[in-house]
Image (tube, rainbow, N blue to C red):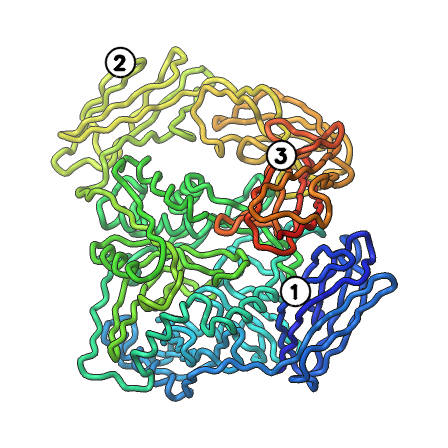
Amino acid sequence: MPTLRLLALACRKTQEAIDEPYLEVNNRRVWGPHSMNDGDSESLDIDVEFSRVAHVDLWEYDRARSDQIGGKDVDSSISGAGTQRVNLDGRRAKYTLTYEVIEEEVPRNTLRLREARRIAEEMLQEMRVQGQGWTSNSQIVASYPVYLPGIEEPSYYEFKVKTEDDDAGYILVNANQSDVPVPELCLSGPTMTELYRRHVGAKGFKLYRYGWLTSAARSTDGKETFLASSGFTGLPEKILSHVAPPRSKQPTRAVRSTTAETLPIEAFHQEYRRRVQQKKTMLLCNPTDLQEYYRKVSTRVVAKSGDATTPDSQLVNCFESDWQTPAWYQPWRHIEALGTDCPVGCGNTAWTILYAYWEQFKGKSRLFNTDLTERAFNQSGEPESVMWEIAELTGTRFGKYMWAWQDEYTEFGMTYGSRMEDGIHYAQEKGYSDASVTRWRGFERKKWDAIDNEIQADRPVILLINNRGNTNYGFPDHYVVVERTLHISRSGVDTYGYYVNMGHGMDPESGFPHKWLFTVKKGVDDSAFSAFFVRMTDEAGPRPFQIVVRNAEGKSTVCADRSGNPQITFHLTNLKLDCEQASVQLFIEGVLIRTFSDLREKEDVSFTVAGRKRSVLLRASCGGQRAEETVHLDYDPPTFDHILVTPNTHREQSVILVVEGLRDDGYWNASDYQVSGSVDGVGVPPRSGTSLVLTDLSPGQHSATMRIRDGCGRLSDTHSTTFHIAEHPPSVTFINPPEGCRVRRGSALPISVVAGSSSGIMKLSIYLDRESEDEFNPTRLCYFPGYPESFGADRPTLKTCSAAIDWTPGRHVLIAVAKDNSGQTNRAARTIHVE
């Protein structure tokens, strides 16, 4: 297939003081917008595949309406004619584009289909022997090509397996030494190709694979548009259409915006393609080590005598349906600050799945309050609440972004690897103070051995899979739970596998429930770049003897009745067989008031507390067992000092009203409260929590009221406040450095920016070349928060900082991003040259 290689774009004359040009090929943006001035030149190095004619358009970006500068039809007949130049001129702007057309192929030691099938048959037999779900009735019945961007011929063949009449998964075989021989397989359900066919309703597409989690279907009708993709959102592997907006299983609230930033799947595809052509392998693979691997083995040689497979290591116990860990998926919840629903995040789901195994089979009986045997495949209830509790501990970030092919946002919940270890605090708070977690980073050379040791010790492992393929695009990685490991030795070469619970539940349409992921100890850079090993001291015995307060609300709080005297009802659970009756002592302010004797399992006991006491202590004993429970008492409605108005960082024309200085005699979770109020005299529906999110506010002054209800149903007094919504986005202007200045590498660059807004500045950030706060690839140079004290409301405020110039020589762009307290954003750019 011919390839249009865009080499450079030179600006001879701008249309504006500073232009923001971008390029499209066949109506798809492939570069820009970037700031350019007279005399500037940009090196592009962008490859775009096309059929017969590629139509190139140059545009000047404008938020309201972009202007076309010029266009050019490039015919495939000039392939091999060398470098070409064309002037793309508009009414005022004048640019020169340098390009060439090539027919590029990446040579490969390619397998024929029948040879790839032989490898699949060997793997099928291997998994039969290992008892991995396939039987003597399991057969390969079909094959489908799968492509790697940058390589014209199929890089993989996906072999469909059926057991009698049932879909039984697939085996993916690499055909050209760009990856390990069998990168992955699945033991149940349809193939990837079949799922895409069902989703897009057509067979005219190429299936591209970017890694263990990410793939996309691209049309073969000459337009080469993306029809659907998987793994590019906060729900890895769920196939999403590029024709209609995606819908989650549970309803979400669409938040529409004309200023949303888009994530460029086409740009990702092209960058991935270029890098494959440079590395000659799939991007997760190390070319040198992979070549060494293939030198040791000819994939065309039948397995020799003496080849062996080490029996797989696996967790000892199983829940229902032979799952060693629960089939849970990510629940959704309304996030007040966003005004929409978000998933809890795969990291918190993985933690909860891991804790379920420790609870059910390893004696850690305080991690959950209910028997998990019947709940292992039930998403609702306590497992869901545990996931959200862990999300608070891990500082999970909730947000939303928009794809170019969507007309609404996609929500996500993301736990950074640097905070994932904080999930161990959940076990520590449940009384397992010795619980610990170790994060193992780096290459696969020793990681598989360490994970295998954990599985042999009957300890599940959390694995963080790289989903970005070492590109510059921050697509979400994914946490999974390892249940089994496998070591296969063939022709003197070793292959190592992880059998993982993907955290997708049991529905193949939402992503494959389980997968075998294969690697070699040499050959993979960062295929699964973090493993998390959890340890807790072994504990044996039944569930703990405990006191259950039957009429408690929130955090063990009982409400006083109209007489002002709260009545407490409790019973005991989990009495030992040799202790059929127990006693409970009642303490108030440290004084023993009463003893309840001869109590049986789940026998309700009620008593009344007089005298407006703050709390009471129940202390139970039954043989050698002991249990305590503090019961808090609530008499009065809540009070608070005032309403705090804070900006909504995720939406324009929006603020958050927060109850400030809350006081209550009960002991409540934030979610036990309910707030209500009004804006400009119009009532706002009540919401749980201690804040209200107000959206779609008109510019100008507004008034608001709020009151709060506690878990007993008691209402506070009403408070009021006023706030201002700016009519225009904030102003932001660079003072220093001057446009186009030249600076020396190794020096310090003073930066000065002026920003202001009638509603005040919420935050001002300065980035280098692109806006990114990814913990693995940040670009933010300076940050000026507007909290606790906002700035720039009365008049624009000057902010200064200094940046060490350790950047590569050449052209760079400083980007200042100001967000005001109305949620509106504005940007300014300044070009510098590093020498």
Q: Give me the C-alpha separation between circle 3 and circle 2.
A: 47 Å
Residue 671: x and y in percent read 49, 34
Residue 95 placement (x, y as % from top left): 78, 65
Along the line of sight, the residue nearer the viewer: 754 or 237:
754
Amino acid at the residue labelled 1: Ser
Nearer-N-terminus badge (3/1): 1
Answer few, some or many: residues within 10 Å of disc 2's Cα (few below 14, many 20 plus, some between 14 and 19). few
Structural crowding at the residue carrying mark 3, measured as other residues with C-alpha within 10 Å and reported as few (<14), some (14–19) or many (≥20): many
Seen in the picture, residue 12 relative to 391 is either above or below; the reply is below
The N terminus, quarter of image: bottom right
Left or right: where 266 falls relative to 583? right
Residue 185 visible here: no
Mark 3 or mark 2, whichever is nearer to me: 3
* C-alpha gap between disc 3 and disc 1: 44 Å
**Which numbered dot is residue 43?**
1
Nearest the viewer among 566 and 149 is 149
| First in sequence: mark 3 vs mark 2 | 2
| Secondary structure of residue under mark 3 | strand
The Cα–Cα distance between marks 2 and 1, rounded to whole angstroms, is 83 Å
> Which residue reaches farthest right?
91
Q: How many neighbours does mark 1 have within 10 angstroms: few (below 14), some (14-19), or many (20 or more)?
A: few
Q: Amino acid at mark 3?
A: Ile
Q: Which residue carries the number 2 mark?
A: 593
Amino acid at circle 2: Ile
Tag 3 residue: 656
The label shown at residue 427 is none
User: Considering the numbered disc 2 on the image, is that residue within a helix, a strand or a loop?
Assistant: strand
Q: Is residue 549 visible?
A: yes
- The quadrant holding residue 730 is top right
Residue displayed at 47% across by 66% down: 509
